[in-house]
Image: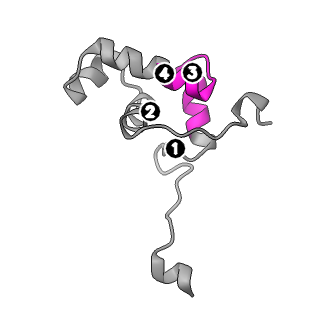
């Protein structure tokens, strides 16, 4: 059953999407900061903003939200290939 909490589509910035993807791989905030070459505090702020925008309370709920809305792909689960322009025209 889908929680009513996850019923809101949200627009995330490119950086927020990048951080969401790294959260979904299990990286800590410090590991994300090192990978992106930014401060841990900046990552903390991004994650706080993402949690607020998505109305999720923690990283697990955030990843569930991302899976539901097709924002993250885990080991080829919940992944889709978008049709090319030529496929759309036919």
The image quarter containing residue 25 is: top left
Q: Earlier in the sequence, mark 2 or mark 3?
A: 2
Q: Marks 4 and 3, Cα distance to the nearest angstrom?
A: 5 Å
Q: CA distance from mark 2 to mark 3?
A: 13 Å
Verify CB contact (< 8 Å) between mark 4 and mark 2: no
> In this figure, which residue is indicated by the disc labeled 4?
49
Gap between marks 4 and 1 measured at Cα: 16 Å
Cα–Cα span, label 4 and label 2:
11 Å
Q: Residue at x 48, y 43 (%)?
A: 74
Label 3: few (<14), some or many (≥20) within 10 Å? few
Give 7 or 28, whichever is nearer the viewer: 7
The crowd level at tag 1 (other Cα within 10 Å; few <14, some 14-19, many 20+) is some
For label 3, the residue is 52
Identify the secondary structure beneath mark 3.
helix
**Is residue 32 rendered magenta in the image?**
no
Label disc, if present, on residue 71 of the rendered structure:
1
Q: Residue at x 19, y 25 (%)?
A: 37
Question: Which of the two discs, 3 and 1, sits closer to the camera?
Answer: 3
Q: Disc number at residue 20?
A: 2
Q: Quadrant of residue 30?
A: top left
Q: Main secondary structure of the magenta part?
A: helix
Circles 3 and 1 in contact, beta carbons < 8 Å: no
Residue 80 percent coordinates (x, y): 53, 59
Apparent side of residue 63 relative to residue 46 in the rendered image (left or right)? right
The CA span between labels 3 and 1 is 16 Å
Q: Which residues are magenta?
A: 49-66
* Dot 4 crowding, Cα within 10 Å, few <14, some 14–19, many 20+: some
């Amino acid at each position: 059953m889908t929680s009513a909490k996850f019923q809101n589509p949200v627009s995330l910035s490119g950086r927020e999407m990048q951080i969401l993807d790294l959260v979904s791989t299990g990286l800590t905030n410090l590991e994300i900061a090192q990978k992106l070459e930014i401060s841990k505090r900046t990552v903390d702020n991004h994650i706080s903003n993402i949690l607020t925008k998505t109305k999720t309370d923690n990283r697990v709920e955030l990843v569930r939200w991302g899976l539901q809305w097709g924002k993250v792909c885990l080991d080829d689960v919940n992944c889709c290939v978008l049709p090319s322009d030529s496929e759309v025209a036919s």
